[in-house]
Image (cartoon, rainbow, N blue to C red):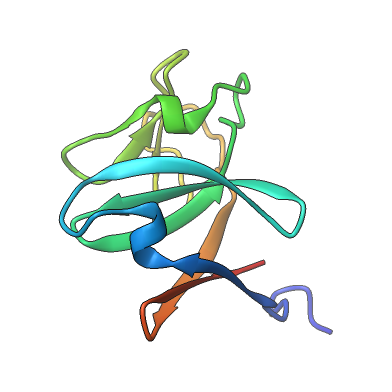
Amino acid sequence: MNWLHKEIKWVPVGPIRQWFEPGINAMVLIEVAGKDITLAQWHNQIYAFAKKCPHAGGILANGYINAVGCVTCPLHHYSFNITNGRNVSGEGYYLKTYATKIEEEELWIGI
């Protein structure tokens, strides 16, 4: 297998309404296949990324998503793009992100 093209294993995590109300921007922590993952709903899209900030381990679900769609850590206010994990506040860290999809109202996460 080419390391650039890792095969995704899709894991169901339940009905989307189990985690979010339509139209409400929010974040929650879940466990998927033994991994702690932050789920976020922002502008009616679902995103998944690591539980902790790669800088100092702040719990990202305790932070917030800013006006341009970046999750901001509650400890030192480092910000990350929730679509690709890039650090946008200039420190050079990357946030682990996971693919998501919704099929027939069921949320799936690719790990």
Query: Residue 14: x and y, percent?
Result: 51, 67
Name the image quarter holding residue 76. top left
Q: Nearer the viewer, residue 88 or 12?
A: 12
Left or right for 22, reference 56: left
Q: Determine whether 109 is above or below 64 in the image.
A: below
Residue beneath the point at 44% across and 33% down: 61
Query: Residue 84: x and y, percent?
Result: 45, 57
Left or right for 80, reference 30: left
Quarter of the image that includes the N terminus: bottom right
Task: Please say whether residue 20 is visible from this viewpoint.
Answer: yes
Numbered label tally: 0
Q: Nearer the viewer, residue 40 or 3?
A: 40
Residue beneath the point at 55% across and 43% down: 95
Quarter of the image that includes the C terminus: bottom right
Q: Nearer the viewer, residue 47 or 27?
A: 27
Q: Determine whether 57 is above or below 26 in the image.
A: above
Residue beneath the point at 57% across and 47% down: 30
Query: Residue 87: x and y, percent?
Result: 45, 38
Left or right for 88, reference 36: left
Q: Nearer the viewer, residue 49 or 12?
A: 12
Q: Residue furthest top?
A: 75
Query: Residue 100: x and y, percent?
Result: 47, 69
Q: Determine whether 56 is above or below 65 in the image.
A: above
Task: Please say whether residue 84 is visible from this viewpoint.
Answer: no
